[in-house]
Image (tube, rainbow, N blue to C red):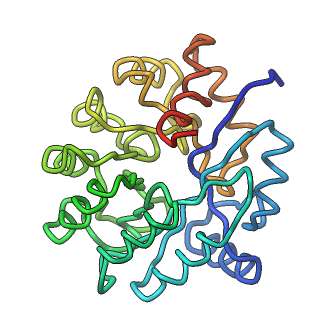
């Protein structure tokens, strides 16, 4: 494997004592395969095996009451090669205070999963949350498009994400799954060329390589990042898939590392 600098901006871990149960529940819901055990140690072993310098973990609170405990876990999970985002359930009683706590704790962003958290990304109640995040400089990282394990409706389609961008232009937004899993025609219509960051998880096995390369260049390579959604995909094969998309070496360096390093202030 070619030696590269690599940042994986989309991974998941759980507390060691909860990881096995969490993985079992999610496998049962989605029907997907988990390639790692859901622990920080398992993720870090995969990173070492595949030459990944940093991974960004993306937690999701599925109930409002989980929000503070998950965030306390991520703020206390200190690893030199892991960067932890926080979580915020839209139903949490005091979202602005939790946003401020995360910012004070050095957390760089918040992961939203609108399907698991049962909200549409452009609901009116979300805009004070987005504005507060923009004010304190936290990145909003969204699951975008279809979720394999959940029925319709899709709560974070590209068109609704574009409305968020229009109303809160100062919000730094990352749309996972290249802007919308299984909705890439809509991504092309509503998000390509906009001030949104895209990442590659659950894209490179689904979107033909020429289409990916064309869309990435139209969007702006400087706003595309490498992600895997580990443990739901294997980091090594995802690296190989990106290398086969037809991007040149400068573009690959940007997507694998340089863009994420710039966004995360590394």
Q: Give x and y (percent) for residue 75.
A: 59, 70
Q: For the point 50% across and 33% down, which residue is it? A: 262
Left or right, 163 with respect to 192, comes to: left
Q: Is residue 180 above or below residue 141?
A: above
Q: Percent x, y for residue 260?
A: 53, 36
Quarter of image, res 228? top right
Please state, as top left, top right, bottom left or bottom right, where the N terminus lies in the image: top right
Image quarter hosting the C terminus: top right
Image coords of residue 237 (percent x, y) = 73, 37
* Viewer-nearest residue: 259 or 122: 259
Say whether residue 76 is left or right of residue 89: right
> Relative to 209, is 204 above or below?
below
Classify 172 as above or below 140: above
Total marks shown come to 0
Task: Name above or below for residue 45 compared with residue 114.
Answer: above
* Residue 52 sits in quarter: top right
Q: Residue at x 62, y 54 (%)?
A: 83
Viewer-proximal residue, 49 or 54?
54
In the foreground, 109 or 201: 109
The residue under the point 27% across, 48% down is 171
Which residue: 52% across, 40% down? 265
Image location (x, y in percent) of residue 5: 71, 29
């Amino acid at each position: 494997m070619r030696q590269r600098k690599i940042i994986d901006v989309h991974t998941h871990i759980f507390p060691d004592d909860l990881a096995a149960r969490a993985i079992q529940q999610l496998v049962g819901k989605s029907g997907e395969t988990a390639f790692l055990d859901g622990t920080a140690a398992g993720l870090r072993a995969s990173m070492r095996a595949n030459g990944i310098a940093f991974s960004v973990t993306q937690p999701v609170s599925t109930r409002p009451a989980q929000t503070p405990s998950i965030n306390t876990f991520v703020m206390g999970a200190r690893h030199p090669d892991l960067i932890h985002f926080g979580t915020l359930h839209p139903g949490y009683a005091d979202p602005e205070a939790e946003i401020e706590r995360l910012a004070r704790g050095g957390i760089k962003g918040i992961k939203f999963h609108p399907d698991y958290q049962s909200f549409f990304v452009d609901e009116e109640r979300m805009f004070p949350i987005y504005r507060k995040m923009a004010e304190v400089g936290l990145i909003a990282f969204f699951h975008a498009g279809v979720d394999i394990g959940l029925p319709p409706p899709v709560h974070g389609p590209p068109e609704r994400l574009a409305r968020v961008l229009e109303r809160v232009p100062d919000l730094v937004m990352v749309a996972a799954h290249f802007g919308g899993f299984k909705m890439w025609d809509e991504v092309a219509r509503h998000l390509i060329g906009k001030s949104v960051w895209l990442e590659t998880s659950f894209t490179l096995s689904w979107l033909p390589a020429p289409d990916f390369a064309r869309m990435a260049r139209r969007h702006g390579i400087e706003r595309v990042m490498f992600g895997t959604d580990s443990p739901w995909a294997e980091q090594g094969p995802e690296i190989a898939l990106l290398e086969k998309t037809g991007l040149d070496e400068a573009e690959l360096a940007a997507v694998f590392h340089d863009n994420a390093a710039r966004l995360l202030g590394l």
